[in-house]
Amino acid sequence: MMQFLQLSHFGKEAVAKRELPQGSALQTLVKNGVLTIEERIESRLRDYSDMELVDPQSIVLNEEQQQAFDCLQSNSHNIFLLHGVTSSGKTEVYIKMIDEVVRAGGQALFLLPEIALTAQIINRLRKYFGGKVGIYHSRFSASERTEVWHRTLSGEYQVLLGARSAIFLPFKDLKLIIVDEEHDSSYKQFEPSPRYHARDAALYLARQWEAKTVLGSATPSVETHFNALQERYGMATMTKRYGGFSLPEVTCVDMKEAHRQGLVKGHFSVALLQAIEEALSKKQQVILFQNRRGFSLRLECDDCHEVPHCVHCDVSLVYHKATNSLRCHYCGYSIPVPSECPACHSTHLKMTGVGTERIEEDLQILFPEACVARMDLDSTLQKNQYLEILSDFEHRRIDILVGTQMVTKGLDFEHVSVVGIINADNIINYPSFRSYERAFQQMTQVSGRAGRHNGGGKVIIQTYNPYHQVIANVMDNDYQSLYNEQIQERRVFRYPPFYRLIEITLKHRDAEVLNAAADWMAFHLRSAFATRVLGPEYPLVSRIRGLYLKQITLRFEKSEPVADAKRVIRQIGDDLTKQEGWSGVTVIYDVDPA
């Protein structure tokens, strides 16, 4: 009883049952009517309803922002592309649009490609909308997601911020959908099913609610820009950075020439190291982008050149120094680092390639007085780890941030003056028809993190091919030239936006069974669709988690209805699994693969 009185401030407040000793004493007090037990809903989410708010009407838009806002508010289209350079102030335009919806009693959905991005934007939205803002993403527990679900359905949350899964929330009165960084491949759901693109699903959702959709990006996808030029979408452009600051100066370092002249230390050119040293001396911050996690990309025997591979997947194992192990990035298979080559028993083993772990360690040696941190999948596994890293960087407790694609997307830091791209060739030379587009987007986006609040930012791209067209487009910030080249190639080679793709993947543990099934399916598909069928072919990684893979791709003209084609494809797939001996073959369909 004394414990209850202390916790309840002498009966003024309720006390959770779990905080009191469980046993007969508590049961006796309840039985005799001294204490009463009642059930209450306890929120797992922090309450922001009483915080002091700033009126969104107080936001003063500059001339370019106001023109974009007026264009987006017009009724000429239901879908708009907001094409604004990095740091042009797109978020302020979004907030003004959201304010119009909230004042009218409606709901707005704000989609972001990465959970890490929600940390910064949520603080900006809560500054204006407080407890009306809800967050939804996969890092939340099931109980937290359930609570967000109910608050959305009741209309308590008028502004919903989340990653791609947020489109499935039960909205009450949806009036506006904002898809920020609409070009980002993270919007595509690959595994597990359902396989969908959140941007395209958002357009369908908006059509159901008769809501307005804004697709925002500094580097729009080719398909979105094409639709805007065809006037299927409206388009507003912002060509200048907010505050009149200049775009960062982008320079390219020819690593072949730098090696020849002895101007390379480890994996860094002298030009990049000098830029980092200059930034640190001015108490400014640095972001380095390397699109490979781990310490070293592979362990290789110097005598027979054997490379340890995953036993379940057709990929080499990546060395992780933190755990001193070789790990597969597809299935998680891991082994200790061998002391000798498993093939020839030589002890002459060497590390080749470089990942974010190695970059982080080398920087700690080169700049011992600087605080270096890493942001990749390995360093953000725990629930709020990415929030801690971003908070430390924002409050200048971190001087140099090394990261994968996580650091390229939409982050806004005041004191970043230097951005380095360690190896641009890895991004460009990827076997996909979207590789040049993606390379331009990633390099332009990470470049946009520099000099956002004071101008004078510097970006250094390290490459062995400095005359590549994509590198030139990034240096000139010339999206239009890249678009013109890509649209011509796609027209000639029959790719989106002129054609729709359907990718069929077959999986089985036995390679011979898989080959026979894939050939059978391709034959029947060609009987129905003739030259529209490509394959079957092994994908870039032909075995994952012990299952062999083969792919068949179908291309259909945009003007052609594909509903009938889908029924035929599905029937052929169902017939395949009914064939004797092929019942174990898994058939996966992916419409509009990213």
Image: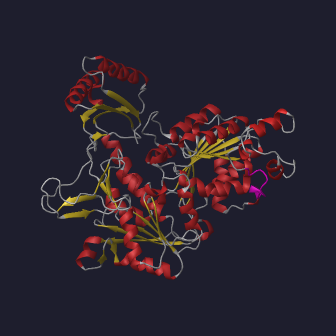
* Magenta residues, start to end: 47-57
The front one of 470 and 327 is: 327
Q: So how many labels did they put on this image?
A: 0
User: Is 349 displayed left or right of 3 in the figure?
Assistant: left
Asked if residue 51 lies in the magenta stretch, the reply is yes
Q: Quadrant of the C terminus?
A: top left
- Looking at this rendering, what residue extends furthest in the front direction? 24
Against 30, is 580 above or below?
A: above
Q: What's the magenta bit mostly, secondary-structure-wise?
A: loop
The front one of 35 and 521 is: 35
The front one of 500 and 1 is: 1
Give the image quarter of residue 462: bottom left
User: Is 529 displayed left or right of 173 in the figure?
Assistant: left
Q: Residue at x 40, y 57 (%)?
A: 440
Against 36, is 443 above or below?
A: below
Against 21, is 205 above or below?
A: above
The front one of 227 and 128 is: 128
Q: Position of residue 169 (x, y in %)?
A: 62, 36
Give the image quarter of residue 22: top right
Asked if residue 223 lies in the magenta stretch, the reply is no
Give the image quarter of residue 173: top right
Q: Position of residue 589 (x, y in %)?
A: 38, 30
Q: Position of residue 57 (x, y in %)?
A: 76, 56
Residue 62 shows in this picture: yes
Residue 37 shows in this picture: no
